[in-house]
Amino acid sequence: MKIIFATNNRHKLTEAQEILGSGYQLVTPCDLGITEDIPEEQPTLEGNAFQKARYLYDRTGLDCFADDTGLEVDALGGAPGVRSARYAGDGRNSSDNVALLLENLSGQADRKARFRTVIALIFGGKEYQFDGVVDGTITDTPHGGGGFGYDPVFVPDGYDVTFAEMDSEAKNAISHRGRAVEKLAAFLSGAK
């Protein structure tokens, strides 16, 4: 089954493809000649995911899904949340975001956090939502060379390593995006 995934992020694409398996062919906006930035202007993860999915559906009329993910840190009132990718400001990178997060958590005893992913699916012209959450804590310093984003500072509950220290199979088995994509895959397999 061919389905559009509203991302040009190769990390996300690979992770989703590994979970969905060979029965699905993920197509990116670039594969369809859509090269402009897809808007993410909503104040919530849900809003952004649906905005991106609707943007693609309106242009293609094809089944598609989009996700939005945020790191929510208790001691920071849920920040960076929907602004996770731009936490340190526009034009900044993941290292800048991690550095600002650690600076803002300096001296904080409560380092509880969660990664939350919302997937918005438009399938057969109808909208569906799938959520995935993984709870954990933020480390004092980055560890590991794998993963992306906040992975080097996030230790999932029940583990003593960061997401960046896990191989992709182990991370996908417990990750927020993995959990949401598994729910998506279960829905799609029932819809075939």
Image (cartoon, rainbow, N blue to C red):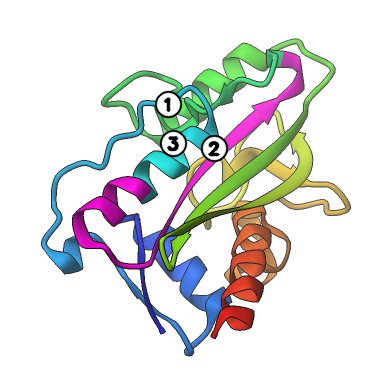
Tag 3–tag 2 contact (CB < 8 Å): yes
Report if residue 64 lies within the magenta region: yes
Name which residue lies at 57% across and 36% down: 70
Between discs 1 and 3, the one toward the N terminus: 1
User: How many other residues sit within 10 Å of disc 3, few (<14), some (14-19) or many (≥20)?
Assistant: many
Report if residue 36 lies within the magenta region: no
Name which residue lies at 11% across and 62% down: 33
Asked whether 123 or 157 is in front, the reply is 123
The residues tagged by marks 1 and 3 sit, at their Cα atoms, a distance apart of: 5 Å
* Residue denoted by label 3: 48
Quadrant containing the C terminus in the rendered view: bottom right
Q: Give the magenta range.
A: 54-75
Q: Measured along the vertical axis of the image, is residue 102 above or below residue 94? A: above
Q: Secondary structure at mark 1?
A: loop
Query: Going by the picture, which residue comes out furthest to the right?
Result: 158
* Residue denoted by label 1: 42
* Residue denoted by label 2: 46
Asked whether 54 or 20 is in front, the reply is 54
Quadrant containing the N terminus in the rendered view: bottom left
User: How many other residues sit within 10 Å of disc 2, few (<14), some (14-19) or many (≥20)?
Assistant: many
The residues tagged by marks 3 and 2 sit, at their Cα atoms, a distance apart of: 6 Å
Tag 1–tag 2 contact (CB < 8 Å): yes
Task: Name the spot of residue 46 as percent of width and height, x first.
Answer: 54, 37
